[in-house]
Image: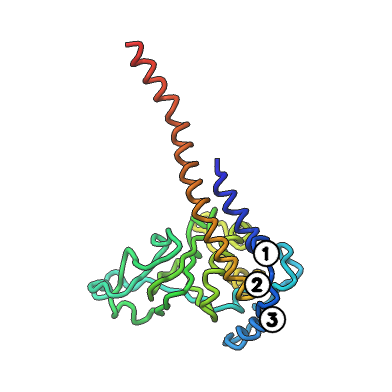
Amino acid sequence: MRLAASLREAVLMSAIQGKLTERSDSDESVTIQMERLAQKQVSKTKKDLLPMDSVFFEIPDSWRWTTLSRLGTLSGGKTPSMHDESNWSSPDINWFSSKDMKQKYLSDSKMKISIKGAQELQIFPAGTLLMVVRSGILKHMLPLCILTHEATINQDLKAFTLFDPKMCEYIYWMLKGLQPIIIQNYTKHVTTVDSLRLDEFFYQMPVPLPPLEEQQRIVDRVNELMPSINEYEEMEKRLVALKEAFPENLRDAVLQAAV
């Protein structure tokens, strides 16, 4: 029984197809938005291709297909030497790993590193989107989080720094909506540890881009619906637990009455 999960998936898929929001003539053209983003794109490579024959679904005429590489930069992290105590002796800087990726917003890491330990690492600002790119969990989900405080990361994560930070919440929900497609088409499932096929995921995967104003309407609508779905999921879990426990509890009650 995973009705809540199916409902969440359906809502997000509807959102990124433009089925939860209305179009508005006053919205800035998405073409202008993409031109503005292109000016911030430092370099383009042959990998930065958009195979238009492989888009996943229909989108409104006012939207455009693009790639993540045209929306921001993707950066990695690493683990400072565990043998050098000075890297960890003064916990000054958040250092996130896959163990931290359990909620939408991240502000405090389980482990922290010193300023010395962070010297060779990139520090990412609030509003950066973190994603797990190497973990067994990629068999069934893509963990995503939004930084609320500056931090650095380890080698199992990637940081997606957007050219326009105002798009962060939409990109978060958009990738959540594409999660089944990402798991099926852009993940390497191997015997050791699963990982994202990063070149294809970042440079070639088509992603739907609405006008900036409609992105906010989508975020508002999804944020309005998610608490009810989460509440239903908790009820669903309690129901499953009750069904599993009830036969044993009933048997105990009958025996008690018999005695």
Residue 150 image offset from top left, x and y in percent: 38, 76
Q: Is residue 205 left or right of residue 99?
A: right
Callout 3: helix, strand or loop?
A: helix
Q: Is residue 252 left or right of residue 19?
A: left
Q: Residue at x 57, y 86 (%)?
A: 40
Alpha-carbon distance for marks 3 and 2?
10 Å
Residue 212: x and y in percent read: 61, 76
Q: Say above or below: 189 vs 112.
A: above
CB atoms of marks 2 and 1 within 8 Å: yes
Q: Which residue is identified by label 3? A: 31
Q: Position of residue 233 (x, y in %)?
A: 50, 46
Q: Return the disc, 1 or 3, that comes first in the chain's sequence.
A: 1
Q: Tell me the amino acid under the disc marked 2.
A: Pro
Q: For this rendering, which residue is in front, 89 or 236?
A: 236
Query: Crowding near pointer 2: few (<14 within 10 Å), some, many (20+)?
Result: many
Q: Nearer the viewer, residue 178 or 222?
A: 222
Quadrant where the C terminus sits is: top left
Q: CA distance from mark 2 to mark 1?
A: 8 Å
Q: Which residue is mark 1?
A: 18
Image quadrant of residue 44?
Answer: bottom right
Residue 1: give x, y in percent of width and height. Answer: 55, 40
Disc 1 and disc 3 in contact, CB within 8 angstroms: no
Instruction: Out of 13 and 202, give the one closest to the viewer.
Output: 13
Give SS at disc 1: loop
Alpha carbon separation for disc pair 1 and 3: 17 Å
Q: Which residue is mark 2?
A: 210
